[in-house]
Image (tube, coloured by chain):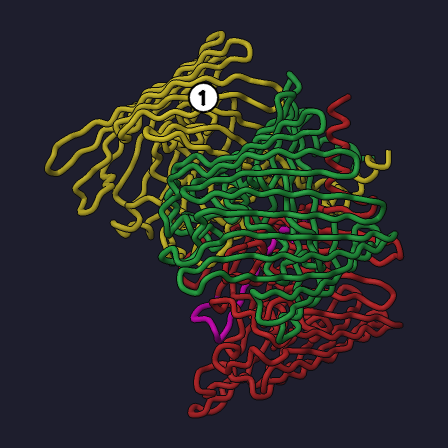
Chain colours: A yellow, B red, C green
Amino acid sequence: MKKVLFATSALVLSAGFASAEVAVSGDGRMGMIYDGNDVQFSSRARVKFTMTGESDAGLSFGGSFRVDQENYSANEYRSAARGTAGQVWISGTYGKLSMGDVVSASEAAIGDLYEIGYTEGAFAGDIEEISYLTGDGENLDQGANILYEYGIEGFTFFASATDGSDTNLGSISPGANVDDELNASSDDVAYSLAAKYEAGNYNVGLGYGKHGDADEIVLGGEVTYDQFSVKGIYAKYSDRFTGELDAEEFDSTIGLAAAYQADALLVKGFWRQDKFKYDVAGDEKFDSFGIGADYDLGGGATLAGGIIDSDYLDDTVADLGVKFKF
Amino acid sequence: MKKVLFATSALVLSAGFASAEVAVSGDGRMGMIYDGNDVQFSSRARVKFTMTGESDAGLSFGGSFRVDQENYSANEYRSAARGTAGQVWISGTYGKLSMGDVVSASEAAIGDLYEIGYTEGAFAGDIEEISYLTGDGENLDQGANILYEYGIEGFTFFASATDGSDTNLGSISPGANVDDELNASSDDVAYSLAAKYEAGNYNVGLGYGKHGDADEIVLGGEVTYDQFSVKGIYAKYSDRFTGELDAEEFDSTIGLAAAYQADALLVKGFWRQDKFKYDVAGDEKFDSFGIGADYDLGGGATLAGGIIDSDYLDDTVADLGVKFKF
Amino acid sequence: MKKVLFATSALVLSAGFASAEVAVSGDGRMGMIYDGNDVQFSSRARVKFTMTGESDAGLSFGGSFRVDQENYSANEYRSAARGTAGQVWISGTYGKLSMGDVVSASEAAIGDLYEIGYTEGAFAGDIEEISYLTGDGENLDQGANILYEYGIEGFTFFASATDGSDTNLGSISPGANVDDELNASSDDVAYSLAAKYEAGNYNVGLGYGKHGDADEIVLGGEVTYDQFSVKGIYAKYSDRFTGELDAEEFDSTIGLAAAYQADALLVKGFWRQDKFKYDVAGDEKFDSFGIGADYDLGGGATLAGGIIDSDYLDDTVADLGVKFKF
């Protein structure tokens, strides 16, 4: 009994306001990755804070970030306290506005292919992720990004943008879009517009993104039928140079993912093909395949493994382990 | 049943004692800053831990820091686990003793001018803050600082100090007092003594600080009448050289702030004038003005904006956004 | 009432599953360290997350790390999200398997000498800690380590290992085993095997560790009688070179610790002797002595102080302060 009282007083102190609170959740994973040469142990533990509140007039607001997203130091990305990781939002009848390290409108509408393995694709460099031109860590050299979402009937409309003003952080983060540095386009507003339509057992999305001279058009759709789901994505880029001297241009990606759920077992697979244009060498295509399975152990634990073969990698890679939700 | 036992033992383990606990609170903000040239998005999300306990004899003790104040790495300030951010304290009938990145006695007694805007002055470099000679991040090259507070009747007495021993962290933090490096005075104890008297609707404070050859005398007072409050601060420095070769001396600051509360609306403004002495150029004065308004939306959300004009800045700057408390 | 309801929903939201949860605990300390020349203030505040869950089949799992153990940035150790700090585990009738920055089997079975002072030995560089060859931060250049524990009757068996594959993080952490760099042995599996027997008022442990050419044999035992406890440890290393050019070899450590508990007072002391072999200078022995006392103030607060004299240090050092558990 005393314990219950405890928990209560702690929450009251922490919240400070009747309607505002901070929820603490976490995740973890442990297992082995075969990197093509060696089997390596790989584990992690993370904690996430989700803050929520409601104004007198009924506006919802909140913020969220993980402990590892608060990497505060001068001239560095990935700090929730600097707006370059995590996000804050406000939401009402007019829609939801988020700011921070948000995804682009295109990504919000369409997303990525299915994640496989206990490391959720990390064992192969997250190759299941579509390379969206803007947002999702790409444009944080301009500081916080914004994302606006508005839903009506089965439609959801999305708009995202940077502010077009370089924050001049000393260094470019490893994950930043190389274009930012090479083409000095970071002072251009990077924006994206997208729409999604959801109905019963299917949804379709269309997105457009632009940053400097480069743009993207992304089309996606997903169908669920009984225990099956299938998702397809096509992304076409223009003037998206990824190498030095504009010799290498990222032309397009086509991707397909499928999943089958049978009780606690979920089998997933994907294929994608990226097309690049080279000044000298002509066109080149990179194929990637992945297949994996998740087995729900209950209580937040899932046994999972995956195999990925990609033209980007020298070898076929695989992982096997357990992932946890707390 | 077993689950409950689990949860229980976890709490017992974590809390360890009936009276000790960790409260988790947070804050966030989102909006736009006009930096004189561009409008920039600016957001942040933060989480704070407040730990409290009580000994058998009735001594209170605790500690607090934010996630962004734990930036652990070799040779760096701003780590609660190293005593260079956040603080711990112990408190009883004899007063309260705090250690860590504490404010100086002068600052504890007098404080700063009123913060304006949703970024609480950050959009103009926190120009509402008085430049106290010691504490508040200034002397962390000597490791943890201490602050002692004792209250009797309407009076509160404050004393703060460093230990006079450089911890030799490799680099000097961006916010550190330049004197520390230039005058090699960091091996001198930096200390401060202050007193504050509070009565009904007013309070006055007087503080003295010393570090190496430099010292400060700070005088402040605040009056609240109905919905109005007014605060004035005068700080006079001696031998406080801020440039190289002792050519630039920070002489004094005079500051005035006023606020008016009308229901959910709070209007605030401040003016300050800093006087510098130069070897060659003679004296120079820097004026700064700010005005802003907060509108309480309830539930922890506040709509706020501010405009600041300062001789330190090339342009007038402004911000407008929402700030949250969780 | 509303608050209680809220608290409930908060827990439900954060946990996500009935049996999964994140417990938040903390610690702190404040006091003074005499480093042989100067008296320095030293404080810290830390928060720890302990995540626990249980699968449908009754497997326990969890993870834990402190905020200061999440120092995420490229090419750096000490990040729970990268598996180089904190740990995750899964546990059932078959034993417990942990992964991350775990201790070695030897250390799990035998441990260290008694910690003294309010900084728990940190004021003298944690000289009470036995220098285990593997685990406990030593082999994190190979990423996450594993530790397996299995108990039956009074016996507990331990096995730990690295994966034998360098993760090629750019830099070697300050605490990393120097051998890793000098002898390029980091691609060798570092492993350890140990057993412990506990009965009534005593326990004994035996451990073996190996990394590259170096190995260790560690023997330890502890007896508790009334208010007295005594612990002894002997560690013998082979081919454990600690200097350049294999000119300095760490040969062995013998250590003894004793404690006496009288109500709230706990008096502790230790002595250790480390033997090194030098090519030119012959053998050399380094002695270290420490004595200290803890006084339990109740509620999680302990007054503690210690004095340590070591051949590794130029001067006798001491600390005195208060430590807190929240």
Kindly indicate the quadrant of the structure image that contains residue B35.
bottom left
Residue extending farthest to the top is A226
Residue C169's x, y, as percent? 39, 46
Residue extending farthest to the front is C282
Residue extending farthest to the left is A280
Residue B23's x, y, as percent? 72, 46
Q: Is residue C283 left or right of residue C195?
A: left
Residue B32 is at least partly visible in this image: no
Q: Nearer the viewer, residue C316 or A42?
A: C316
| Residue at numbered disc 1 | A305
Determine the residue positioned at 75% across, 22% down: B2
Residue B229 is at least partly visible in this image: yes
Q: Is residue B304 magenta?
A: yes
Per the image, label 1 sits on a secondary structure element best described as strand
Determine the residue positioned at 58% across, 87% down: B213
Q: Nearer the viewer, residue B30 or B75?
A: B75
Q: Nearer the viewer, residue B171 or A207?
A: B171
Residues rendered magenta in the picture? B295-316
Residue B218's x, y, as percent? 68, 81
